[in-house]
Amino acid sequence: MILKTTGGRWLGAVLAASAALTTGCTESVDAGELPGVYRNSETGGEIELGSDGTFTATGISADEYLGRGGADPVDFSGRWEFLGDQAGSDFVYLAIETGGTGTIGGVQLYTRGGGKVEFNPDPDGPPSLTLTEADTP
């Protein structure tokens, strides 16, 4: 009897965790469609994902991409890699090579489909910054 109860609790925990991950999922993103410029119209922050695997971020504070470190906008750049469906969510790993706070090697930029990406340093909280793909001529 104890074994069945323990097994039932374990199964319940697994199902609850799966539900939590599933609710955070959004539409799948094609890595080939990611290169482009993404902006936040309120803050002016911008990320450019180059088709050559490089990125440039301008006007984004450490609070927005790290969840700590200050509200002053900083610029940083490096290389990006799309990591689809890792831990239940598609994201772009930004390997920071220059700029930023100088204390972190990389951050995750989550893809949300519909031309949106966001920083979310606190997985239990709302995104700290959402950027929308800019129309380019």
Image: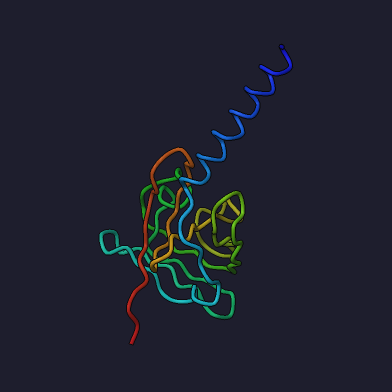
Please give the name of the residue rendered at 56% of the width and 74% of the height, measured from the top-left corner: 54
Location of residue 102 by image quarter: bottom right
Number of numbered tags placed on the structure image:
0
Image quarter where the N terminus lies is top right
Please give the name of the residue rendered at 57% of the width and 50% of the height, measured from the top-left corner: 88
Residue lying furthest top in this view? 1
Q: Where is residue 9 in the image (x, y as percent from the top left)?
A: 62, 22
Q: Position of residue 92 (x, y in %)?
A: 55, 62
Instruction: Please state which of residues 70 and 19 is positioned toward the viewer in this rendering.
Output: 19
Using the image, determine if residue 78 lies above or below residue 20.
below
Please give the name of the residue rendered at 27% of the width and 64% of the height, measured from the top-left corner: 41
Residue lying furthest left in this view? 42
Using the image, determine if residue 109 lies above or below residue 134.
above
Q: Position of residue 36 (x, y in %)?
A: 44, 76
Q: Is residue 51 left or right of residue 65?
A: right
Location of residue 105 by image quarter: bottom right
Using the image, determine if residue 104 lies above or below residue 18.
below
Q: In this view, does 135 lie to the left or right of 81?
A: left
Please give the name of the residue rendered at 38% of the width and 67% of the height, measured from the top-left corner: 114
Image quarter where the C terminus lies is bottom left
Q: Where is residue 71 in the image (x, y as percent from the top left)?
A: 36, 49
Instruction: Please state which of residues 67 and 136 is positioned toward the viewer in this rendering.
Output: 136
